[in-house]
Image (spheres, rainbow, N blue to C red):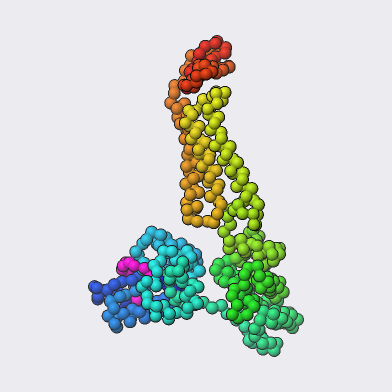
Amino acid sequence: MVVKLNKGNALKKSNTTESIEYVQNESNITVINAIGYEYNEDLHIYQSLIDDFNQFSKETNLNITIYLNLFTRHNATLENKSGFLYTQETYLKKKSNLYDIYFYDSVYTPQLGSYFIDLSQYLSKEHINIYNEKIIFEVCYLNNKLVGLPVTLDFSVLFSNTSILNKYNKKIPTTWDELLNTTKYIKEQEKILNNNNDLIIYNGLFPENEVGTCSLYEFIYSYRNSENSTFPVVRSQETVNALEMIKTLKDEVSSDQTFLNVDELIYENLFSNNENALFLKYWKTIPEVLNEIEDLKKIYYFSISTDKSLLGLIIFIIIIIILIVMISSTSLLFIKRFYPFISFLPRDFWFLIILGSIILMFRALTEYGKVSLILCHSKPLLLSIGITFNLVPILYKLIEYLNKPMNGNGGNGGNGTLNMFNFKNNDDDENINNNSFTILDNNNNKQIKSLK
């Protein structure tokens, strides 16, 4: 859990009577409002920290009081931390001064960190060095900015039922292989001696939230080569061994329901195309799983480089050819024999349509190169401009047509219809200036309309 400090001053009613009296008795008190979330309000540490600070502030005359606004399952409709994340991000996007301190899970630092101030500009190095250097560097820094400070650390533990272990003269396992052998033996003995098939041998703890993700990372991390080794890369043999052991534990000593004892497992949506969890059915091979994990971590883009694929270069060549054809098509607007086919719109409008089509093709080129803020913003901009240039001429012609009254005095019995017509160039072949044409009714050989 990380805390972030902001500026602001919104006074709210406190949860504790002591702090209420303290705020009321001192008119020059600076009130700092904090916001946090805890599913179980009886297990959080925030209020204890704040009460200690408020007491210290009172004793040393700091004239500062912190009020905690704690979101829980009882006072808010938020189902989990993800819902609270949305609430916090909404306040931050609106640049609200309602809250000054934000307690949040460190896994959301990439999403929230950009809204926070750089604490290294306000705190001394001596104060920052109080915290564990490795922890604060991994969870509190974003783009070389200190966006928070660690408040609590969560540790996952493996609970061992010593009474059952002692019953079968087994020790607490220290490796996954020992755990597998121990649990297999106890499971078989319980079934033979006590006809007990309901014993929970091992629960994987892989719910569909950050807890499941943490369990997976912890399992893979436990398979590193040595204690001082870094986290194994996704395609390493260590990762393969870890995934195979997870499957073995599930198949041999656990069950579908027990292996994922709470919620739906995280792999259902991430790795299995909405089938049952990957490590339940395990329809895919280890290389396929690693590919999908890597796909989730990477941001792909097109490139004209042929190092990994020819697809990017092929599509790029096709786009360039289409652009050349589009640009060359403007020459058709100046060829006399095509005038009857383009007289529907003024020449300027045809240029506008071609320009819109070219812009839409340039929109496809924004998929090339690494993702950047400029490229992301240019995509909808080019799309909007291109479609607008394409549709405006047609819309103009439609409006012009709807606003022009119909002429009922036509040929062929006076019903205003033309059975056949042709175009006649009003200019000679050598001097084409005004590009005017006359529509002739072939039935009555009468001039119907002159076009320019």
Examine the rendered structure and indicate whether residue 325 appears above or below residue 109. above
With 293 as the anchor, is 40 left or right in this view?
left
Residue closer to the observer: 247 or 304: 304
- Residue 12 is one of the magenta-drawn residues: yes
- Residue 376 is one of the magenta-drawn residues: no
With 270 as the anchor, is 189 left or right in this view?
right
Marker count (numbered): 0
Q: Is residue 425 visible?
A: no
Which residue is found at the position 48% from the left and 55% from the top? 373
Which residue is found at the position 24% from the left and 76% from the top? 25
Q: Position of residue 352 (x, y in %)?
A: 48, 35
Quarter of the image where one finds residue 338: top right
Q: Main secondary structure of the magenta part?
A: loop
Which residue is found at the position 53% from the left and 33% from the top? 330
Residue furthest to the right: 192
Residue closer to the observer: 220 or 49: 220
Q: Position of residue 279 (x, y in %)?
A: 67, 67
Q: Is residue 28 visible?
A: yes
Q: Position of residue 215 (x, y in %)?
A: 59, 72
In this picture, which residue range is highlighted in magenta? Answer: 5-17
With 327 as the anchor, is 52 left or right in this view?
left
Quarter of the image where one finds residue 90: bottom left
Residue furthest to the front: 430
Which residue is found at the position 50% from the left and 39% from the top? 356
Q: Position of residue 120 (x, y in %)?
A: 39, 72
Residue closer to the observer: 405 or 13: 405
